[in-house]
Image: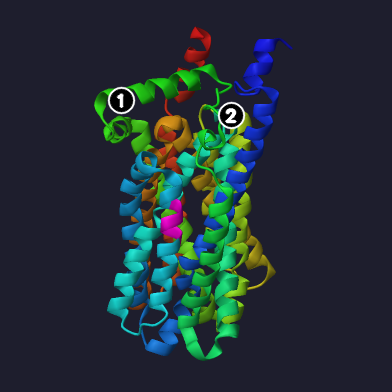
């Protein structure tokens, strides 16, 4: 192996520098992934507390559908700005501040009884939570080269899936620890977990190689290096808000916005309502209902870990075929799930549906680093996540309204399957001519 090849493999570092860089890249990935996992304790907790909130307060599915949608709106809008702001002012500052502020909002909710005040606090919680993921994607782009970003973003996204499991367990544990507090316990105990995670993160994660005395790495793909430098130059020439114009002018990026919106409708259509479905349709106890649906987020965690990693190996230049496959399998599985009672088969179907639905999200974040590079991956992720949670907010209100007015659970799951079909159509359109373009680029190179 030539000296030039060795230097490229080590990302432009000496052996000693590369060892230090690689160690810290893993530390950053693990620290952010665990932190984001714990963040879900203060976001998904409402899904698992909803049946108790309805029983204790007399609130309807529509009331809580609107309540849960408030977070989706503020979270999505927050991402539109926070991805870029994090890149400008420092990603770790945003990540740490968002974690502690979200924990504070959850604690305050645990001492309220007015649904209006809870909705206001839940809206603030959504904005605070939006201060982590998009800056986190920028953080990972600073530490992981192009040929491994699908793995890195998928790994972090997998922990958000595990976070949904942690949220379910945290709420169940809350009811045991504070049995006299009712649904409010499901907001207080998770907040304590979040604070502990935030304190630990401060001591481990550095937001760029410069913070440990290293220069930026040289990507193994020369084209990606050239693109990074070109994008940085364009920002310097056109201003800090230029990334928004650059991204939105690309029609394929706009197609990815629709893909992530659809994916979130399907994802949250299951996460938000399946626990309540088990309680209302089958008379399952709330704690058993929560634990009976844990396989759904567990499947999500594993799917978004595995599928983006595979896309790095075989579909790095065009991840859309993987999106089509995942959406197709998800739609079929959800369609069959609505005819199955709680039990091992239903659990297996939830696992499979979660595996492939959330894998689409993992592919989206890999695409965000592809299109934004180290220059503005956080901005790309922020715009994409904005559309993700616009989709999530739509499902919360729409499905809540359907259930309040008709109680038609089959319509809910049929709509989720239909959204998966729509994702397939959009992905086919977005991929039109892309493989041919890539082949022409390879030939030219």
Is residue 337 at least partly visible in the picture? no
Give the mark, 2 or 1, whose residue is nearer the N terminus.
2
Q: Nearer the viewer, residue 378 or 359?
A: 378
Q: Which mark is residue 206?
A: none
Count of numbered tags: 2
Q: Position of residue 223 (x, y in %)?
A: 49, 18
Q: Position of residue 32 (x, y in %)?
A: 55, 50
Q: Position of residue 95 (x, y in %)?
A: 45, 52
Local SS, label 2:
helix
Is residue 330 at least partly visible in the picture? yes
Local SS, label 1:
helix
Location of residue 179 by image quarter: bottom right
The residue where tag 2 is placed is 147
Q: Report if residue 139 lies within the magenta region.
A: no
At 35% from the left and 48% from the top, the residue drawn is: 82
Location of residue 398 by image quarter: bottom left
The reply, left or right, for residue 213 in relation to residue 412 is right
Q: Which mark is residue 236?
A: 1
Where is 126 relative to 133, above or below?
below
At 52% from the left and 55% from the top, the residue drawn is: 36
Q: Residue furthest front?
A: 213
Magenta segment range?
95-99
Give the main secondary structure, helix, strand or loop, of the magenta stretch: helix
Q: Report if residue 98 lies within the magenta region.
A: yes
Where is 262 relative to 347, above or below?
above
Q: CA distance from mark 2 to mark 1?
A: 26 Å
Circle 2 residues within 10 Å: few <14, some 14–19, many ≥20: some
Where is 378 relative to 405, above or below?
above
Give yes or no for contact between labels 2 and 1 (Cβ–Cβ under 8 Å): no
């Amino acid at each position: 192996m030539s000296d030039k090849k060795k230097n490229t493999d080590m990302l432009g570092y000496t052996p000693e520098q590369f060892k230090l860089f690689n160690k810290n890249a893993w530390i950053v990935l693990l620290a952010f992934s665990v932190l984001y996992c714990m963040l879900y304790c203060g976001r998904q907790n409402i899904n698992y507390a909803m049946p108790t909130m309805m029983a204790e307060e007399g609130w309807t599915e529509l009331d809580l559908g609107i309540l849960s949608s408030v977070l989706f709106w503020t979270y999505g809008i927050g991402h539109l700005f926070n991805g870029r702001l994090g890149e400008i002012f420092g990603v770790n500052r945003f990540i740490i501040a968002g974690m502690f502020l979200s924990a504070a909002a959850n604690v305050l909710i645990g001492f309220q009884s007015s649904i209006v005040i809870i909705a206001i606090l839940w809206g603030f919680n959504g904005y605070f939570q939006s201060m982590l993921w998009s800056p986190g994607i920028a953080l990972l782009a600073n530490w992981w080269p192009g040929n491994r970003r699908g793995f890195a973003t998928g790994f972090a996204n997998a922990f958000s899936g595990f976070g949904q499991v942690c949220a379910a367990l945290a709420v169940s544990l809350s009811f045991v620890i504070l049995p006299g507090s009712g649904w409010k316990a499901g907001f207080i105990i998770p907040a304590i977990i979040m604070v502990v995670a935030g304190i630990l993160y401060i001591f481990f994660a550095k937001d760029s190689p410069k913070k440990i005395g290293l220069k930026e790495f040289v990507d193994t793909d020369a084209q990606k290096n050239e693109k990074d430098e070109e994008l940085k130059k364009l920002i310097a020439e056109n201003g800090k808000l230029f990334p928004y114009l650059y991204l939105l002018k690309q029609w394929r990026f706009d197609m990815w916005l629709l893909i992530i919106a659809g994916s979130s409708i399907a994802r949250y259509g299951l996460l938000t309502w399946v626990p309540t479905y088990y309680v209302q349709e089958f008379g399952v106890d709330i704690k058993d209902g929560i634990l009976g649906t844990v396989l759904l987020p567990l499947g999500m965690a594993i799917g978004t870990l595995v599928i983006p990693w595979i896309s790095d190996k075989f579909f790095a230049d065009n991840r859309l075929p993987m999106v089509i496959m995942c959406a197709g399998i998800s739609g079929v599985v959800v369609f069959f799930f609505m005819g199955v009672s709680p039990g091992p088969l239903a659990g297996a179907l939830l696992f499979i549906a979660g595996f492939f639905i959330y894998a689409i999200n993992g592919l989206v974040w890999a695409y965000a680093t592809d299109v934004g590079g180290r220059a503005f991956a956080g901005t790309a992720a922020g715009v994409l996540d904005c559309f993700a949670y616009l989709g999530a907010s739509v499902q919360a209100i729409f499905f809540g309204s359907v259930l309040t007015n008709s109680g038609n659970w089959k319509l809910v799951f049929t709509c989720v399957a239909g959204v998966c079909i729509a994702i397939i159509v959009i992905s086919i359109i977005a991929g039109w001519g892309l493989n041919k373009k890539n082949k022409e680029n390879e030939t030219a190179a």
